[in-house]
Amino acid sequence: MEYISSTLNNLIHQTAFFNLTWGNYLMIAVACFFLYLAIRHEYEPLLLLPIAFGMLLVNIYPDIMLHAEDAPNGVGGLLYYFYILDEWALLPSLIFMGVGASTDFGPLIANPKSFLLGAAAQFGIFAAYFGAIFLGFNDMAAAAISIIGGADGPTSIFLASKLGQTAILGPIAVAAYSYMSLVPIIQPPIMKLFTTEKERKIKMGQLRPVSKLEKILFPIIITIVVCLILPTTAPLVGMLMLGNLFKESGVVRQLTETASNAMMYIVVILLGTSVGATTSAEAFLNWGTLKIVALGLIAFAFGTAAGVLFGKLMCRLTHGKINPLIGSAGVSAVPMAARVSQKVGAEADPTNFLLMHAMGPNVAGVIGTAVAAGTFMAIFGVF
């Protein structure tokens, strides 16, 4: 009888109920809320669902992220090995290849002025950088945090790892990917605040046709120019352009399909769950992490507002030929931000079609964020 009682007692105390803190329960609730948004409202479920599930797992069973050196048998937790790929900056580069292979750069080539809108939206990066310095982060930590302002998860992870900021890589990644997923919630109020209904109704002319030769030359030229000026951008810009060259060359259909589908989805699973698994209550519920999350939100709002305001300026200069809403797509969340520009424009006028116009600034934003990361690496002498 004593044996049975002891066995049952040991079994009961092995359940998670006896090991979780109030912080774990809070993070579990947050994870469930994110799962609700991903499944019920479809807020970028490809990102939000694996992130939320990783968050759920680590707060129920923290050892799923156990470092190999801390494990009695030398074998770490499952998601720890996924996370290692983040720290090595492998997954961000592969994500960029998949983005390039699945994205049409034609709208950017057809309307090069989109580069200006993409550049304007990077203002959020500088806002976050100086905000982080003001809140007491050192230069490198501030630089790593600042990329959240571009709403670019892969680049945020890449820069944090390159600058040796692994201690805050988790919060940075979670903030960046969360804001990427919540673009449909965060951006519309800002877009409507800085535009009039008349501006939102502006219809833009059809983009000129882009030749196959232009589409093939574009990724080659961008790689040569950007990587010669900032060689540190090669892992990101190079993979982005390689993926796009796969697509536009038309001679490697199998590689294009693999990069944009199978490989992309595998990487999203690995990256999403490992990013979510960095949000254990112990690691996430502290002032340093909360400051990073707050800075990211402020920076993202600044980036969106800067893009829209520059769009208004271009609207004035072109005598109403550019809808300011496409400026909000200058952040790096592809293609979510472009879809939001389309949605807000269609709310003002159901016959308005802005998606392809917004894809130009959106692609420019991806390149711009990678360039910003490369600039920080060059400033700090990191290769």
Image: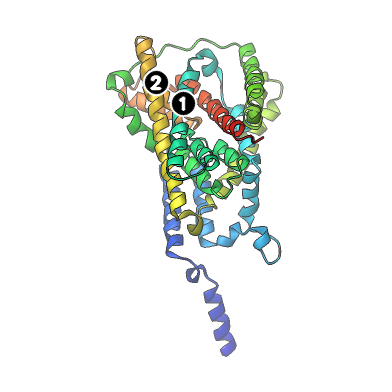
Whether residue 12 is situated above or below residue 127 in the rendered picture: below
Which quadrant holds residue 322?
Answer: top left
What residue does disc 2 label?
A: 310
- Provide residue 19's location: percent of width, then percent of height: 50, 69
- Provide residue 123's location: percent of width, then percent of height: 44, 28
Whether residue 116 is situated above or below residue 272 in the rendered picture: above
Identify the element where label 2 is drawn: helix
- Can the viewer see residue 270 in this picture? yes
- Left or right: residue 195 versus residue 110 is left
What residue does disc 1 label?
A: 330
Identify the element where label 1 is drawn: helix
Q: Which mark is residue 318?
A: none
| Disc 2 + disc 1, Cβ < 8 Å | yes
Q: Residues within 10 Å of mark 2 (few under 14, many from 20)?
A: many
Closer to the chain start, of discs 2 and 1, is 2
Q: Residue at x 55, y 62 (%)?
A: 61
- Left or right: residue 41 versus residue 75 is left
- Can the viewer see residue 45 in this picture? no
Q: Residues within 10 Å of mark 1 (few under 14, many from 20)?
A: many
- Provide residue 227's location: percent of width, then percent of height: 65, 24
Amino acid under disc 1: Gly
Question: Looking at this view, is 101 or 382 the one in front?
Answer: 382
